[in-house]
Image (cartoon, rainbow, N blue to C red):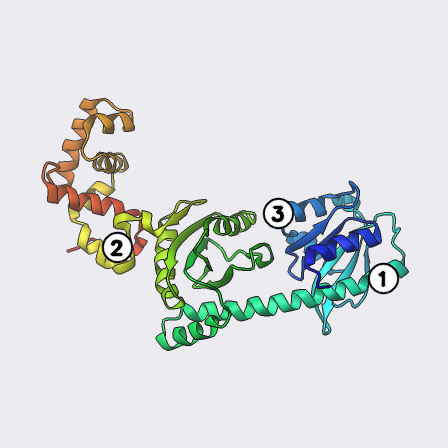
Amino acid sequence: MALDLQEIAELAADLLGAPATLEDRDFHLVAYAAHGDTIDPVRMESILHRRATEAVRTRFERHGIARATGPVRIPADTSVGQLGRLCLPARWNNVTYGYLWLLDDQERITPAQAAQAMPLCERAGLVMARQARERDDLGYKVADLLSAQPDVRAQAANELAEADLGTPLAVAVLRTQTPEPLNPWLLPHSVLSTVWQGDHVLVLPAASPRPAVDRARRLLEERNTPVQAGLHTPCPTLDHVHEGWLRARVAARTAAPGEIRDWTSLGVLRLLRYAGDASLTQATRTPGIDRLLENQALTETARTYLDHAGNIQRTAKSLNIHRQTLYHRLRRIEELTDLALTDGQSRLTLHLALTLTPHLDQDARQATPT
């Protein structure tokens, strides 16, 4: 009978009579099983955040677990509230793929009992080795789908067609300020992931992509980093994934931290996909608009006024100011920009500039058109 990793953790907990936690070699949580109510901060942190801290990893690796071929006893550390535990390496073909942890502060697990659990660890090592190889292989092919070279993309599409991913597909991009790890074990098997140009890219079934994308976003946020997420769907075939990635990347670029923004919701911000920042700056900005952008209050007033289609009452209410104050600000905006807010083309130019500017590269934003 083929066992999955959760079943292996549960069998180990029952066999050894202790709470069990299975982690990969990077200390990402893979599975866990309760046995009684024994817990300590290390186990709680791993379960809550799906990953052990770097301090815990460093402390445990000092005991030689990465090279161990058999059980390793980790003593208690009262300074951090850590209970004693037993580490059983999950290995396959002389390679460590993970660790099975048993809380055993009283050292009730005998060497003979630990030896009985080693075949379960070997099975876990085999399963993790297979999954790691499959995910790595598919991840490399997904990266090739995003290549700038058409022949590389075509070959990757042909190879991935054999994996029977199904279509249509969705593409998601998750952006973080630092390269935070994404735990693939906690994503559905139907989700393929890779890192490309500093972003996490997911390719997944288009039927209902948001739960999986939200899951990936929360996994990254658990590392205390803000995440911007963009989504494009559908991609009718694998050949469309490259364009889907470009659109999802724009959606992520315009998303607020913690938000998943869909390409279909971008409106005029789709221009970010089809023109460079410098070109968009030159097309929409004037010296007068640059003067306006130096005044935060007037900039916000102009943006709110235009977003409300020039409705005075709604704009004043949104800004929480008196109408006469709003009229005064609008006159100042016209003076600064040399644009008449009663003229449709002038309003369009100003609205485009105010909408696009927050999402343009800083160097392009500082380049005043001539």
Q: Amino acid at mark 3?
A: His
Residue 18: image x %, image y %? 81, 49
Spatial separation of the CA atoms under disc 2 and disc 1: 62 Å
Classify 294 as above or below 285. above
Residue drawn at 83 percent across, 54 percent down: 15
Q: Is residue 80 visible?
A: yes
Classify 103 as above or below 26. above
Q: Which quadrant would residue 281 be assigned to in this image?
A: bottom left
Q: Secondary structure at mark 1?
A: helix
Residue drawn at 74 percent across, 44 percent down: 80
Mark 1 neighbour class, 10 Å CA radius: few under 14, some 14 to 19, many 20 or more: some
Spatial separation of the CA atoms under disc 1 and disc 3: 30 Å
Q: Secondary structure at mark 3?
A: helix
Q: Amino acid at mark 1?
A: Gln
User: Which residue in the protein does label 1 denote?
Assistant: 116
The numbered disc on residue 271 is: 2
User: Which residue in the protein does label 3 denote?
Assistant: 49
Of the pair 358 and 297, the residue shown nearer to us: 358
Residue drawn at 42 percent across, 76 percent down: 155
Of the pair 367 and 215, the residue shown nearer to us: 215
Of the pair 156 and 71, the residue shown nearer to us: 156
Q: Secondary structure at mark 2?
A: helix
Left or right of 330: which side holds 35?
A: right
Mark 2 neighbour class, 10 Å CA radius: few under 14, some 14 to 19, many 20 or more: some
